Image (cartoon, coloured by chain):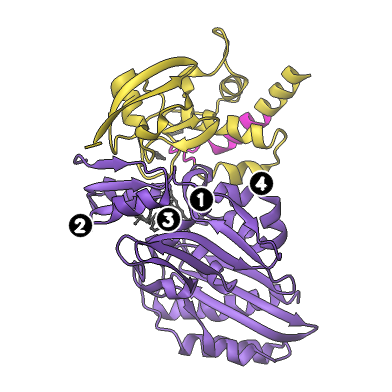
């Protein structure tokens, strides 16, 4: 009976393995088995984005995705971004723009904004709003988040130049 | 979540065998978004899920048929794949348009065309669109294969005509370059709420005249429903206010719209009158 399995995957650049049960969500696995608490469950329904991680470079809701299917993939969480102790440009931009209050939604927003900027390196307001409809901020830092996205886009461009 | 079995067959044949059971808690799984929601809400406790990810065949990918007349879309195609396809944007622009207000990036990255149809939820955006486009579904089961119009898939509220163990393999969409289509997602609270009504229209314009038309209403009714009387008013008519008003009245008269938390029956009927007229004007370029 295949009710559990061992999955082997890359987590923030490191090869790892875990025994998971069918139906176990990615966010539960990260919290309980890897002590990674950046992706956290809030709505639990795919709506708010607090649980965002990327799987092979694609954003998914960790609350609705089964860990089971991670076998052979590469997973990135908020804990894995940035290089050698330096913050990711999107993280820097969020701090500089003050794009949070309580910070509960911030890891999810940052993961989604990185995706957004991969897809639209120079997004207009409409593109940002559309892309981030699945991320909710209860403190309503939306205007600052919009500013942070613009700032992050500029930072990325500068780095690439 | 209670323990259950998860199977990953590598072919359609294996999947059909794994699904061959009298137990209604044995289900296929596409992207798993609807299933996970139901499981987390304890509305559904599977004994076995059969993932269709690895089965290949016509279930994944999409392409234009050799004669250029049909778009064949595999059931495991994700919404993001549709959204980002240049081919879809060219041949089925209404699908690209509909993706803009459907869920969010993360859901579109995993939700599948087949799971969306099999779910049978009348609030979903794509079923009325496939219907107005004249699409058919290819269904595969132990006893063989059948192809039916999308509208025959829906028989009631969360109820489809799929037999236990049957799988949706593909959606077959006719390419009709002379037709124009539009989907109006009419929400009454937030923009991204479930629609109070979904209205999908396709027309074959001939100058100012509506040579042919198809109208499908969803969300306000228990399943995507063709508005045949409204179509009859419009078919062959020259576009004008009077005709649109009559079509709106016919639409309201032929449907059974009930009050729910997205609006009263009277309100939603008025929405239908107004949005039907707007949608027809839009596709007629008026
Ligand atoms: C946050 C959120 C927002 C959403 N917003 C919208 C929205 O705005 N508009 C909208 O239309 N929808 C919306 N949805 C619903 C979404 O479209 C559906 O959940 C999704 O399409 C289901 O597809 P799936 O592949 O995940 O299905 P699954 O969960 O895998 O399956 C759903 C059902 O179909 C069956 N099934 C799956 N594949 C097949 C197959 N090939 N053959 C036969 N049976 C099959 C399963 O057994 C199950 O009963 C939203 C969902 C979420 C989570
Ligand atoms: S907790 Fe996953 S999207 Fe809200
Ligand atoms: S900063 Fe508090 S929820 Fe967004």
Q: Looking at the image, do the residues carrying marks 1 and 3 touch, with CB atoms under 8 Å apart? A: no
Q: Nearer the viewer, residue B184 or B17?
A: B17
- Residue B224 vertical placement versus A126 (above, below): below
Residue shown at the point (58%, 67%) measured from the top left: B184
Label 4 C-beta lies within 8 Å of the nearest ligand 1 atom: no
Do marks 1 and 2 share a subunit? yes
Q: Which label sits on residue B18? A: none
Disc 2, SS: loop
Which lettered chain is shown in purple? B
**Within the magenta stretch, is there residue B93?**
no
Do marks 1 and 3 share a subunit? yes
Callout 3: residue from which chain?
B
Mark 2, residue position: B23
Residue shown at the point (40%, 83%) measured from the top left: B256
**Within the magenta stretch, is there residue A143?**
yes
Q: CA distance from mark 3 to mark 4?
A: 30 Å
């Amino acid at each position: 009976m295949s009710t559990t399995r061992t999955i082997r995957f890359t987590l923030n650049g490191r090869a790892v393995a875990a025994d998971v049960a069918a139906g176990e969500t990615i966010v539960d696995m990260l919290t309980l088995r890897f002590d990674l608490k950046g992706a956290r469950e809030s709505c639990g329904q795919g709506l708010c984005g607090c649980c965002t991680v990327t799987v092979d470079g694609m954003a998914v809701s960790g609350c609705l995705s089964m860990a089971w299917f991670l076998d052979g993939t590469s997973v990135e969480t908020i804990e894995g971004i940035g290089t050698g102790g330096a913050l990711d440009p999107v993280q820097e931009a969020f701090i500089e723009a003050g794009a949070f209050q309580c910070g509960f939604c911030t890891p999810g927003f940052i993961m989604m904004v990185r995706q957004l900027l991969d897809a639209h390196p120079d997004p207009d307001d409409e593109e940002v709003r559309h892309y981030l409809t699945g991320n909710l901020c209860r403190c309503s830092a939306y205007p600052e988040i919009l500013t942070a996205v613009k700032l992050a886009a500029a930072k990325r461009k500068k780095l690439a130049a | 979540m209670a323990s259950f079995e998860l199977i990953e067959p590598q072919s359609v044949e294996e999947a059909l065998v794994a699904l061959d059971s009298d137990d209604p808690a044995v289900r296929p799984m596409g992207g798993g978004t609807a299933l996970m929601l139901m499981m987390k809400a304890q509305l559904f406790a599977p004994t076995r899920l059969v993932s269709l990810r690895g089965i290949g065949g016509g279930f994944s990918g999409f392409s234009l048929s050799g004669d250029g007349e049909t778009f064949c879309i595999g059931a495991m195609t994700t919404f993001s794949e549709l959204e980002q396809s240049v081919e879809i944007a060219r041949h089925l622009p209404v699908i690209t348009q509909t993706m803009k207000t459907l869920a969010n990036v993360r859901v579109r990255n995993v939700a599948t065309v087949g799971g969306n149809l099999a779910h049978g939820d009348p609030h979903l955006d794509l079923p009325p669109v496939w219907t107005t486009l004249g699409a058919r579904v290819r269904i595969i089961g132990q006893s063989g294969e059948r192809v039916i119009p999308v509208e025959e898939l829906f028989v009631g509220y969360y109820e489809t005509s799929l037999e236990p163990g049957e799988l949706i393999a593909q959606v077959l969409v006719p390419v009709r370059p002379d037709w124009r289509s539009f989907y109006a997602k009419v929400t009454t609270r937030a923009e991204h709420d479930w629609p109070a009504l979904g209205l999908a229209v396709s027309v074959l314009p001939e100058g100012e005249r509506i040579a042919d038309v198809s109208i499908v209403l969803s969300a306000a009714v228990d399943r995507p429903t063709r508005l045949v009387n409204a179509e009859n008013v419009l078919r062959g008519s020259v576009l004008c206010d009077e005709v649109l008003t009559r079509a709106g009245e016919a639409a309201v008269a032929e449907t059974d719209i009930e009050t729910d938390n997205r609006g009263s029956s009277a309100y939603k009927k008025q929405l239908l009158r107004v949005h039907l007229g707007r949608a027809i004007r839009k596709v007629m370029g008026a």
